[in-house]
Amino acid sequence: MPVTKAVIPAAGLGTRFLPATKAVPKEMLPVVDRPAIEYVVEEASRVGLRDVLLVTSRSKKAIEDHFDREAEIEAALERKGDETRLARVRASSSLAEVHSVRQSSPRGLGHAILCAASHVGNEPFAVLLGDDLIDERDPLLEEMLTVQARFGGSVIALMEVPREQVSLYGVATVEAVPSGPDDRYPIVKIRDLVEKPPVAEAPSNLAIIGRYVLAPEVFEVLRQTPPGRGGEIQITDALRTLALRAAEDPQAAPVHGVVFTGRRYDTGDRVDYLKAVIRLACERADLGPELYPWLEEYVAAGGPKEGLS
Ligand code: G1P
């Protein structure tokens, strides 16, 4: 069954970006000149997932508004004949059919995904976490959909991270799968998963990054999954159950991983967020030619010369 729906959890409090996120959802923070979440919806839309469900919480109205038409702004730009801006403003409301559902209490990523159950129904679906931006030049999600079509079951995105960072992620134990001539990234079979293990206990440095293509069986497993790390219901724990089931029963839906080697920007961390903004702006034809030489000059002049404040 082809995947047509994407679920984007967007219920987090954004505490790492306070006070910027006191009244503005963290998903709305600009990455260059577009809210972070627009990149993610665009990524889903680009691979044909035009039914997008946002799992939001109280105080996230701005996100829903962003994907709706804004008649007043559009009329003002039309009057001015500002076609370029008009197209950019309209783009966000035509990317996808954006729905939303509320997660009434913050009970974890697994619980947020479970909130999508009735919208998704009995078909495989994608989950995209807004804190991870995948460069549009690197076709991770497309590759994951191909792998899901080949093996069925669920597919998660993995990336090698420095050993000392493994405790920030779900970590996988994997088995290699022979790759085909058209595979862009290595494919592995997931044997086991652990959510945010202490560095010394991590089974590998293969971290789950925020892209999943999930079999609908995950909902039934999530309903049975007790709170795990941080007292929250973890998608990693539900995927572990599916992977262990598949190891015992060859008929059960497998869990595979795609080991991504492209460009990923973590906008959930302040320094990584700033790196993403600078890098993406420098690489843009309308901003880079002015910004990059300035950056080179700033660095050549010794950076923060007045000292750190
Ligand atoms: C979540 C998941 C974790 C995954 C990470 C990817 O954690 O629980 O398994 O590795 O996303 O970004 P969070 O970053 O929301 O704490």
Image (tube, rainbow, N blue to C red):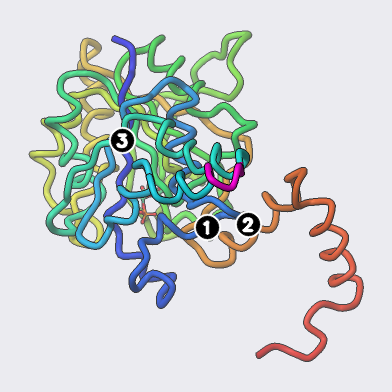
Q: Amino acid at mark 3?
A: Val
Asked if the stretch drawn in magenta spans residue 275, the answer is no
- Identity of the residue drawn at 42% across and 42% down: 210
Q: Secondary structure at mark 1?
A: strand
Return the residue found at the far front: 79
The residues tagged by marks 2 and 1 sit, at their Cα atoms, a distance apart of 8 Å
Measured from the top left, where is residue 285 in percent x and y?
77, 43
- Identity of the residue drawn at 50% across and 42% down: 39
Measured from the top left, where is residue 246 in percent x and y?
25, 21
The residues tagged by marks 1 and 3 sit, at their Cα atoms, a distance apart of 19 Å
- Magenta part of the protein: which range? 78-82
Q: Majority secondary structure of the magenta segment?
A: helix
Return the residue found at the far left: 224
Measured from the top left, where is residue 223 in percent x and y?
9, 39
Q: Residue under circle 1?
A: 30
Residue 6's quadrant in the figure?
Answer: top left
Discs 2, 1 touching: Cβ within 8 Å: yes
**Mark identifier at residue 98:** 3
Discs 2, 3 touching: Cβ within 8 Å: no
Q: Residue under circle 2?
A: 277
Q: Secondary structure at mark 2?
A: helix
Give the vertical position of 138 relative to 297 (above or below).
Answer: above
Q: Amino acid at mark 2?
A: Val
Q: Nearer the viewer, residue 88 or 290?
A: 88
Q: Nearer the viewer, residue 7 or 238?
A: 7
Asked if the stretch drawn in magenta spans residue 81, the answer is yes
